[in-house]
Image (cartoon, helix red, strand yellow):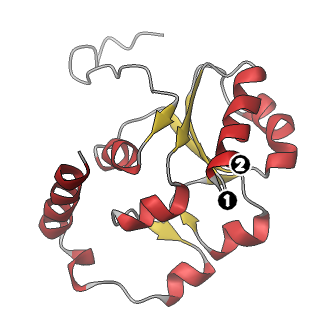
Amino acid sequence: MNNKLVDGIIPSQPPIEALSDAHELKSRLEWGEPAFTILDVRDRMTYNNGHIMGAMPMELEQLTDRAVPSLAKSRDIYVYGESEEQSAQAAQMLKSAGFEHVSQLRGGLNAWKAIGGPTEGVEESLSPPDAGDYNVVDRMKTHFDTAKKEV
């Protein structure tokens, strides 16, 4: 469905890759890009302790049963789990269920935390914020400096 009001204002995104890094996802979140979902396929207790802010919990064992009725098959989906193997398994399950745009988040939650991506959960709320967490300019500078180092 085309929205004439935003045509030409919001550039369309290229299709997501089968593997994405935390910088790509964080960039999409920071620019407020619509129409994507982050799925955490770890067990519920692990999810409750800490996860990427805004990620939806869908345990691996129930993944397709929950994803099929609740997510559009054409939606961009980023998935992560306890390990690269669990993430890859989840991505394959979603693709086999007919989801067209699925990307495995390389490094999962640890990679996300390493670049200062926002998190939430019981354990996450116990760690005090860094001094720069409230300064958007410092956070953007850190994000771009980190992105340059890893390229």
Measuring 86% from the left and 45% from the top, which residue is drawn there?
A: 62
Q: Percent position (x, y) of residue 101?
A: 56, 23
Amino acid carrying label 2: it is Gln
Q: Label 1: which residue? A: 82
Q: Badge 1: few (under 14), some or many (20 or more) residues near its Cα, within 10 Å?
A: some
**Residue under the image location 73 percent in, 58 percent down:** 42
Q: Amino acid at mark 1?
A: Glu
Position of residue 40 in the picture relative to residue 138 (left or right): right
Q: Quadrant of the C terminus?
A: top left
Rendered image quadrant of residue 14:
top left
Of 6 and 136, nearer the camera is 136
Label 1's element?
A: loop
Q: Is residue 52 above or below residue 96?
A: below
Between 18 and 40, the one lying in front of the other is 18
Task: Give the side of residue 105 with respect to residue 135, left or right.
Answer: right
> Residue 72 at what x, y percent from top left?
66, 25
